Amino acid sequence: MMQAISLLNILKPSSRFAASLQRRLCPSIAGATAPVSVHLLRNLSQSYRVSVPPPWCCVQHQEMASDDGQDPRISRISSVIRVIPDFPKPGIMFQDITTLLLDTKAFRDTIDLFVERYKDKNISVVAGIEARGFIFGPPIALAIGAKFVPMRKPHKLPGEVISEEYALEYGTDVMEMHVGAVEAGERALVVDDLIATGGTLCAAIRLLERVGVHVVECACVIELPELQGRKRLGDKPLFVLVSST
């Protein structure tokens, strides 16, 4: 900004040229309105936190990283995830990714962020957890050149399966995978839409490790950190795009 002012003082150009040069070198000097990036972060109570850059900040391009270093695509993804209160039962704030799927740019950005992270990690298996892991897993698998393996609830897969029981808040459930779908020594990524308590992710990890597969990482679109799912995963790395808080 000071360089622009000094240049104008030295050259003493015409007022019309000076105004043009000011607009090109630093719009804030000339009074031009710079593009404003508004980040909407949705939490469980459906409230929003709005962050607007101060007027003297020159935002050069909408794809430029935000001041906190977060990829700007994540703000868009977060803003289109809808929260439905009291679903499927009272007291639950349901994180609904169907609105994300309706936004083609946000959906593409979601897949791109995962692909950029995993394309060079030599992953041969993407394991998707029923049911919404089936939405995000296949496009990631295709993009990184891996096979997709569905991890399903009981009696959903035809043919021979192996099973893993896991605890829920009330009772237990079972996850199944086809026998022969993976081989010992393969490297796997486990994908789901959301991590809450981490029970299903842990079951998927145990199922894969029982047959000698190395689980590189678990990946989710949303995390509910207050439910402390990361603790349940132990030393298994977890990558998430959006936090509910």
Image: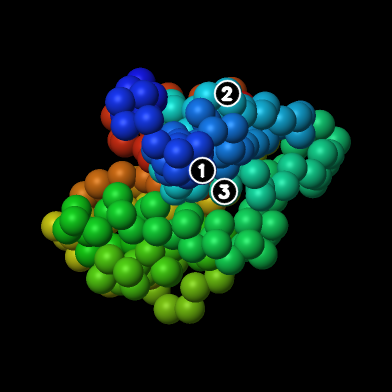
At a point 39% along the width and 36% down the height, the residue shown is 13
Rendering quarter of residue 60: top left
Q: Name the residue nearer the viewer: 27 or 225.
A: 27
What's the distance in space between the residues labelled 2 and 3, CA to CA? 23 Å
41 to the left or right of 86: left
Instruction: State the residue position of label 2.
Output: 54
Q: Position of residue 41 (x, y in %)?
A: 63, 34
Marks 1, 3: nearer the viewer:
1
Q: Position of residue 148 (x, y in %)?
A: 36, 69
Q: Name the residue nearer the viewer: 119 or 128.
A: 119
Instruction: State the residue position of label 3.
Output: 77
Q: Position of residue 145 (x, y in %)?
A: 25, 71
Instruction: State the residue position of label 1.
Output: 16
**Disc 3 packing (10 Å; few <14; some 14–19; many ≥20):** many
Residue type for callout 2:
Pro
Rendering quarter of residue 103: bottom right
At a point 32% along the width and 69% down the height, the residue shown is 143
What's the distance in space between the residues labelled 1 and 2, CA to CA? 27 Å
Q: Identify the mark nearer the N-term, 2 or 3.
A: 2
Residue type for callout 3:
Ile
Q: How is the image coloured?
A: rainbow
| Circle 2: element type | loop
Question: Is residue 81 shown above or below 158?
Answer: above
